[in-house]
Image (spheres, grey):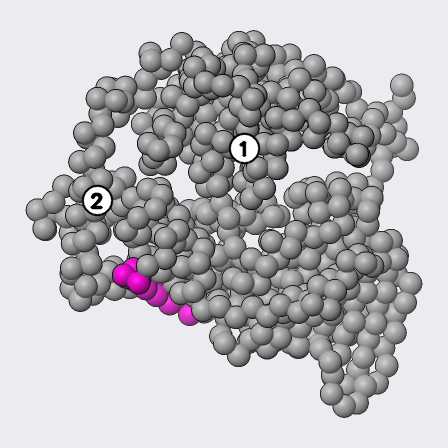
Amino acid sequence: MTYSAKDVRVLDEVEHIRLNPGMYIGETSNPVHLVEEALDNALDEALAGYAKIVAVIINTKLNTVSVLDDGRGIPLEDNTPVTISSKLFSGAKFQDKKSAYQISSGLHGVGLVAVNALSSEYIVEVYRNNQHAIFRFEDSKLKLSKIDPHKGDKPFSTKIMFKPNKKFFESVKPDLKRLRRRLTTASAEMPDDTSFVLNIDEKQEIFNLSVEEHFLESTITSPTDNISLTKLISEKKPEKFEVLFTYEPVGAVGYKVLSSVNLLPVDNGGNHVGWFCDMLRDFFMVKAKKHGMTFQASDMLFRLRAYLILSLMEPKFAGQTKDRLINPKTDFKRFEPEFKRQLETFATEQEQTLIDYLERFQEYRRKLDANKLKSNGTGGRRASTQFTKLRDCTGRTGGELYIVEGESAGGSIIQSRDPRIHAILPLKGKSIPNITTKKNILDNKEVGELVKAIGTGIDPQFDMSKMRYDKIICATDADHDGNHIACLVTMVIGILLPEIIRAGRYYIAQTPLFAINEKKIFIPLWDEKMLNAARDKGRSITRFKGLGELSPPQLKICLLDPGTRNHNVISYTENINELVKLFSSAQEKRKLVVGE
């Protein structure tokens, strides 16, 4: 095979996005991230104080989405709407002094280019400076560019209309639950004179919640009148860090932290959450000593409910999907003096509430101590000796538990893991029962070891605070048997330990069937598009039948390294009864297959 300069191909921005959509927008099961890219720009106009109306309009019959606002409108000079729709890293948010936007959630200069690239039709419509402009693209090719004079009132300033291209998405229906959450968060955190609207097939929803209402609805499981909210605000203009927190008297013993950055919900938290918890822990430690009570660092998480709201000039997110904030903890030190001052005010003015919290911590600790006879008796250290298969991690807290299929895969992963972080539990796939049909499920050895390893127990003794790992990850081969085993494990956890899934702490690891494998280069090919692209370029490709065929360095790239692995968080369905019915009834499975 020859290789010359003629074989080198340079892709333009749009071509590269269309070839690798997941690299730019993350998940491609539906186009919700395209909606969010356009919505981010509208919300940035609201954050800057220029837009008072932000609306998302969805037509499910035409499969179109429109996002509009009444802000300043995209500038029309120098063909700007075309530039920001077709050239990566273009926008008004890259200047050092941020003259157009001081605080914004859209920072990467990718948004509208990705919307255009992944849509069969894309239209930018602008009213600005007594002009009305329309720019229409079809399959990312500019077909119309028109600017006319306009007098009188304008219906909006900027409208982005697009039709997601079916070639790039499993479904062209955006995730409405996620969109509603985005708009709910914006309505709660923005002033009351800003309106947020979702219109679906002419049915209009208006979002109008206060911060307190949003916090209570999202985190409190058993609403009651005697919940005391504590509010902390520290401003270093134009930046701000706001916190609402309380301790729920009843409900799940684990913590629930809601957070957002520049109106963007940050589902997987980040260093800002860790920094706040560190500060709160130190505060309670000092106050417990003052009041003659015992307190341990982890006690402060007992039924903690918190809402963290940040406005930052330079937020740093983990990836284009922005689900985790990765700014170093030192970035938040500037807010600390004011927070500490306000916590001291809380301790003085609401001393009885403080004492109530400390007493709850103490009572919780007494219960834990009383249950030590039921635990492994290792004084809090990790211990593998009570299990026949578990190869535990050595860190005292946190870590990740990998549930793998068989000893072969388990042995390879053990060689590639970081023993401080990664725990490995190999299970015999064929020995995992269908929990929906198997009686005496806890008598099954594989299920029993899994539940013991996780450490929470099951209802009615389930205790989230005893979970021994930050994440539970199911890693099986990328074939039908592996998928079947992953389903069985997921159903075991979904029925016996549903709170783990609800907390977003259960994942399924995507494992590649193919990878580019050239000397020291190893690149997993996660889907057919990536595989075809690699084949087109003549790359050396290896097929893997299972995890056991991957070498330890390759496993580290595919499975363990946060920068290169591909883990999918599993969401808890509200239709669990229907899912159980499907798993337990052969007739229901036949209906699904043959469409009866």
Q: Is residue 18 magenta?
A: no
What secondary structure is found at the residue carrying circle 2? helix
Q: Which residue is mark 2?
A: 361
What is the x, y in percent for residue 276? 34, 51
The residue at 84%/68% (across/down) is 135
Q: Which residue is mark 1?
A: 507
What secondary structure is found at the residue carrying circle 1? strand
Q: Where is the C terminus found, in terms of image quarters?
A: top right
Q: Where is the N terminus found, in terms of image quarters?
A: top right
Give the magenta range.
Answer: 225-237
Seen from this angle, which residue lies furthest left?
292
> Would residue 420 appear left or right of 361 to someone viewing this image?
right
What is the x, y in percent for residue 268? 49, 45
What is the x, y in percent for residue 467? 37, 31
Quarter of the view holding residue 148? bottom right
Please state which of residues 503 and 140 is positioned toward the viewer in this rendering: 503
The residue at 49%/58% (across/down) is 261
> Would residue 4 appear left or right of 556 to someone viewing this image?
right
Instruction: Say few, some or many: other residues with alpha carbon within 10 Å of mark 2 (under 14 / 14 to 19 / 20 or more).
Output: many
Instruction: Say few, some or many: other residues with alpha carbon within 10 Å of mark 1 (under 14 / 14 to 19 / 20 or more).
Output: many
Q: Is residue 227 magenta?
A: yes
The residue at 61%/32% (across/down) is 581
Quarter of the view holding residue 243? bottom left
Quarter of the view holding residue 218? bottom left
Please state which of residues 49 and 510 is positioned toward the viewer in this rendering: 510
What is the x, y in percent for residue 587? 71, 27
**Which residue type carries mark 1?**
Tyr
The residue at 51%/26% (across/down) is 492
> Would residue 493 appear left or right of 66 to someone viewing this image?
left
Distance from Cα at disc 2 to Cα at disc 1:
30 Å
**Which residue type carries mark 2?**
Phe
